[in-house]
Image: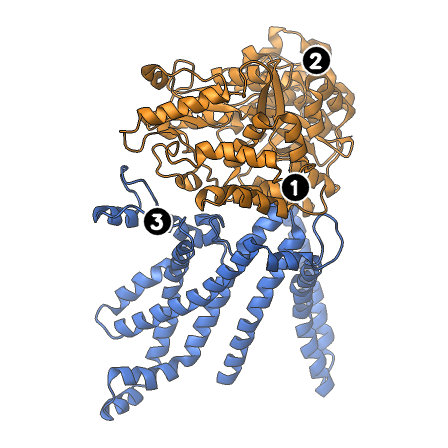
Amino acid sequence: MSTVEKLGLMLVALGIFAVVFVGILVIAARFSGRVGERIQAGSFVLPAVLFIMVGLIYPALLTIRDSFVEDGSGGYGLQNYVDIFTQSAYLTVLKNTALWVILVPVLATAIGLVYAIVVDRSPWEKAAKALVFLPMAISMVGASIIWKFVYEYKPSFRPQIGVLNALLNAVGIEPRQFLLDIPMNTFFLIIVMVWIQAGFAMTILSAAIKAIPDDIVEASQLDGVNPMQRFRFITLPAIRPAVVVVLTTIGIGTLKVFDIVRTMTGGQFETSIVANEFYSAYFSQNRPGLASALAVILFVLVVPIVTYNVIQMRKDA
Amino acid sequence: MRSTSLRRPKAAIGMAAIALVGLSACGGSSSDDDADGGSAGGGDAIDCSVYEEFGDLDGKKVTIYTSIITPEDTPHIESYKPFEDCTGVEVTYEGSKEFEAQLQVRVKGGNAPDLAIIPQPGLLQTLVETGKVKEAPAQTAANVDKFFGEDWKAYGTVDGKFYAAPLGANVKSFVWYSPSMFEEKGYEVPQTWSEMMDLSKKIAEDTKGEEGVKPWCAGIASGDATGWPATDWMEDIILRTAGPDVYDQWVNHEIPFNDPQVVEALGEMGKILKDPAMVNGGLGDVRTIATTEFQAGGLPILDGMCYMHRQASFYAANWVEAGAEVGEDADVWAFYLPALEAEGDKPVLGGGEFIAAFDDRPEVQAFQTYLSSDVWANEKAKNTEGGWVSANTGLDVANLKSPLDKLAAETLQDEKAVFRFDGSDQMPGAVGSGTFWKEMTNWIATDKDDKAVLDAIEKSWPASSK
């Protein structure tokens, strides 16, 4: 199909979409009264619901079904899940994923929070914030390549091109293979994600801190609280909703992280995580059943975080 | 990627000229044909009458999808030219680094290319299982019967049906070295495995005083395919210590992956790859093998930091890239990874590509037939500077430009050669491009025990496959 044909087809599809939509509106407009309003509301929601069914719910159900298909034989069973929870390679993957999901949000939020408080109202606030926020603008793959150079290893008798090993070498310590030393290599990968996400945490939390009314801060100063107490009893409670949003957002992002591991180690040396293992299983090893099971596990892990997020947002609203 | 669309007008003129002269004249060497742009690819005009039986193909289009990307794609595109000129078919060439994964996405998504150049028989089998691959036409099968051995035809055959003709080939059983360094130290190219081990020990002794210099250098990192060069090492050694029959049983899982004979082979391999006195010249300790990109694995030879590097014939491209000249008396050259005995069979490990069709339109079948012919193989050879051979017996070795390609072709055609196809490429994906790669990486990176590595791979073999 040529580009012109594809464009033509797109126009036809858009035309059909417009006709259907106008049709729905015209029909909905004919109803009035209490029942009519419901019908109108329903007809507005219907297309969205349909799209979610087709684009999200149906594929999700297919994935759940596929996760029980045993690769090769095509029969149904629990073998994929048994494999994931018994084979040591997959247990390592689950352990690593847990490490990521716990460490990245906590570290990124903590660093972002401390940074936001430290630079708050300082003369260089804007420049300092921009510096920390910059990594957000770099793609994950780009950041991974940068950090791969930071960790680069050359034997001590060769010129060092990795910053960290150059520093080690300068003070007379043998260069280290940061991405190869288990279990520390996972932490060195986690640092990359924290580096990217800390800026995001800092921005949101800084805005929240600035939203605290000045009179409360002044009142507390008149009451004679020290900075630690002010943080504990005024700042933290005031920005709690923002902290929850930041923690959960980074947490969900971390569960999906794939680029960093793929770019830096390819999941080798016991650094793999669920999203990376899912891709390998599906596309390199042709094990769609196992891959679906991994995707389902990822989904199950995200659900509590999303639920908690929704509950918190409802409370605050 | 170069566009082929610019060639259309020219090809049409050539076609018209051919039609005027009469199709039979096309096979002749009349200078008029050449003047009309009949074979700008540098080769002679081809016998167009072969493609007549596919009907009038003028103006038809064929798409081909492959993992062969720049700069290696240019000789491919050039070698299609005689066919395009002859039939008027326009071939669109598309290469991608993400080929293996993307091809499956495209096939499953109903957007398959007409033809795909598939580097692994295991992947071909997977694709055939989707039901989208078309059987090869009779003319292609006839060409393959004529120009290739039965074993090569078997790699393109799934469940008794022939799908994919072999295209290119490579020889993996090579050890790269620097002829001048060998000469300087008075080392001789080893003829047997034990001579090679003795030489390694001698080099280790001789270079004790020089920091970082070791007999061997290696690198097995390759993105998400990290580990494959180590599987090649192992396959080469099993072919030698256990023999081709055991190798076949092992690849087909008729013996367990952790059979004692395999354990023995891995032990032999450890004598080189896991011995700090043997590796990793110029790169660091044993573990650096796991993090060194395979493209960079042999380069310390150029700095005099290491003496030997086992890698396939296609590694020639990396030497050229690094500015070294490949040749018997040049900067680097390769010797055959020795067998246990100097006399007797020479096991040769190799790989290759196969061409699978997802459509059976006449123009696609005509192009398939062209690619399986001796005409194409020779045309490709003439267009390639180096790094390509084929198992096509119609290929005239004299047409190969690089001395290493000649050596590879001679090795393939050697009477004593017992050829075996890359084992990991034939195993089920879960093992061949999964645990085998991973565990070999662990074997080096985390000093995992031989038996534990093989046990883990055996455990991961899908129960449903034989």
Any mark on residue A151, and which? Answer: 3
Q: Mark 2 lies on which chain?
A: B
Whole-angstrom CA distance, mark 2 to mark 1, is 53 Å
Any mark on residue B163, and which? Answer: none
Q: Mark 3 lies on which chain?
A: A
Q: What element carries label 1?
A: loop
Chain that is orange in the image: B
Q: Residues within 10 Å of mark 3 (few under 14, many from 20)?
A: many
Q: What element carries label 2?
A: helix
Could you tell me residue A317's position as x and y percent?
Answer: 50, 84
Along the viewing direction, whichever of A139 and B309 lies nearer the viewer = B309
Q: What element carries label 3?
A: helix
Q: Is residue B175 left or right of residue B122?
A: left
Q: Do labels 2 and 1 share a chain?
A: yes
Residue highlighted by disc 1 = B428
Q: Which image quadrant: the C terminus of chain B?
A: top right
Could you tell me residue B321's position as x and y percent?
Answer: 41, 28
Any mark on residue B20, and which? Answer: 2
Could you tell me residue A258's position as x and y percent?
Answer: 50, 55
Q: Indicate which label's residue lies in the foreground, 2 or 1.
A: 1
Residue beneath the point at 55% across and 68% down: A302
Circles 3, 2 touching at the beta carbon (< 8 Å):
no
Q: Is residue B108 among what the camera can see?
A: yes
Q: How crowded is mark 2: few (under 14 residues within 10 Å), some or many (20 or more)?
A: few
Q: Is residue B402 among what the camera can see?
A: no
User: Hey, what amino acid is under mark 3?
Assistant: Tyr
Residue beneath the point at 39% across and 72% down: A204
Is the residue B110 above or below the residue A78 in the image? above
User: Hey, what amino acid is under mark 1?
Assistant: Pro
User: Hey, what amino acid is under mark 2?
Assistant: Leu
Give the colour chain A carries in the figure: blue
